[in-house]
Image: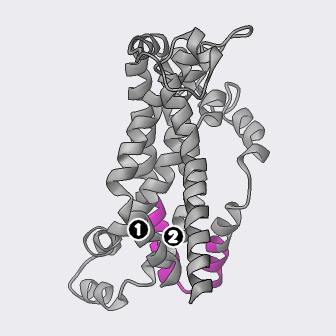
């Protein structure tokens, strides 16, 4: 009994330490976003003597916040819509079609999860370049890439969840006269609500926060997203750290709000997709 209490205390202490470790970057970013440059250089871990809200106003002006926010919103929302619809359709058909070809296609999606983006980014950017597909510096080009990179995990999650949907519902709808498209929209897709929210959250977080792909594809100033706009606080010989911290806070607030509003669906959807 005593040993169990000691183990419980040790686990609680480790949990608190891990929590503090994960929270520490947010603490450093937030407190330094309210400091002057001098105060930031003297001590980055201290609480600010005065809350300088001007940092946020200057950061919004320098990073073109409204334009960058609109670009991030367009890219993220359209990418998520296409990922959810196309991946769920593909997973449904692959789960319901019992053939060797469907198995090969499904395991190809699963294998694609193991390919790191860094290994394909240069050939991909070359293919999308001016002399070939000419999709560099367009929202359509980067959305197309996000849909491709997000499809593997999304198809995997949807495929597991579709197996839990009773096939008798689809058979009854088919007898009533539904074609394949009506069967998907009226019967299958409404039943995939929890896993669709999970897929949207998991993909939305990395698409919204992604810096590497936009830095390769969106080279025009008017097309840059929020993470990419924070790059302009850093020059060749100097860095405006306090404004950069304020810019980072502005960039992460929307996705944190989205995560908090929908976080309950993540565990529910992942468990449903992986166990059933």
Q: Residue at x 35, y 68 (%)?
A: 194
Where residue 138 appears, as percent x and y from the top left, is 52, 28
* Vertical relation: 270 (above or below) 127: below
Where residue 127 appears, as percent x and y from the top left, is 71, 37
**Label 2, on which residue?**
157
Q: Residues within 10 Å of mark 1 (few under 14, many from 20)?
A: many
**Label 1, on which residue?**
195
Where residue 111 appears, as percent x and y from the top left, is 71, 66
Coloring basis for residues: one colour
Which of the pair 140/24 is nearer the observer?
Answer: 24
- Residue numbers of the magenta segment: 85-106
Q: Residue at x 61, y 48 (%)?
A: 21
Label 1: element kind? helix
Identify the image quadrant of residue 227.
top right
Circle 2/circle 1 CB separation < 8 Å: yes
Q: Give the farthest residue toward the front.
A: 2
Which of the pair 138/149 is nearer the observer?
Answer: 149
Q: Residues within 10 Å of mark 2 (few under 14, many from 20)?
A: many
Q: Quadrant of the N terminus?
A: bottom right
Identify the image quadrant of residue 134.
top right
Q: Is 161 placed left or right of 211 in the picture?
A: left
Residue 225 highlighted magenta (yes or no): no
């Amino acid at each position: 009994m005593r040993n169990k209490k000691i183990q419980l205390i040790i686990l609680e202490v480790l949990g608190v330490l891990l929590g503090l470790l994960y929270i520490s970057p947010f603490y450093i970013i937030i407190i330094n976003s309210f400091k002057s440059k001098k105060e930031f250089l003297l001590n980055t871990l201290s609480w600010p003597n005065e809350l300088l809200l001007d940092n946020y106003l200057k950061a919004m002006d320098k990073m073109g916040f409204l334009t960058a926010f609109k670009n991030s919103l367009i890219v993220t929302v359209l990418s998520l819509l296409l990922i959810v619809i196309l991946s769920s359709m593909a997973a449904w058909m692959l789960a319901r079609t019992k053939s060797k070809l469907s198995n090969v296609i499904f395991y190809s999606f699963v294998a694609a999860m193991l390919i790191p983006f860094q290994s394909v980014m240069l050939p991909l950017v070359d293919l999308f370049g001016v002399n070939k597909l000419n999709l560099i510096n367009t929202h359509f080009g980067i959305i197309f890439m996000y849909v491709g990179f997000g499809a593997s995990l999304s198809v995997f999650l949807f495929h597991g969840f579709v197996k839990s949907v009773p096939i008798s519902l689809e058979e009854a709808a088919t007898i009533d006269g539904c074609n394949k498209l009506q069967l998907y929209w009226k019967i299958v897709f409404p039943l995939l609500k929890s896993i669709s929210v999970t897929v949207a959250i998991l993909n939305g977080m990395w698409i919204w926060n992604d810096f590497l792909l936009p830095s390769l594809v969106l080279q025009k100033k008017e097309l840059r997203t929020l993470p990419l706009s924070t790059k302009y606080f850093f020059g060749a010989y100097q860095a405006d750290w306090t404004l950069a911290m304020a810019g980072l806070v502005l960039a992460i607030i929307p996705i944190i709000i989205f995560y908090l509003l929908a976080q309950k669906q993540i565990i529910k959807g992942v468990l449903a997709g992986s166990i059933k």
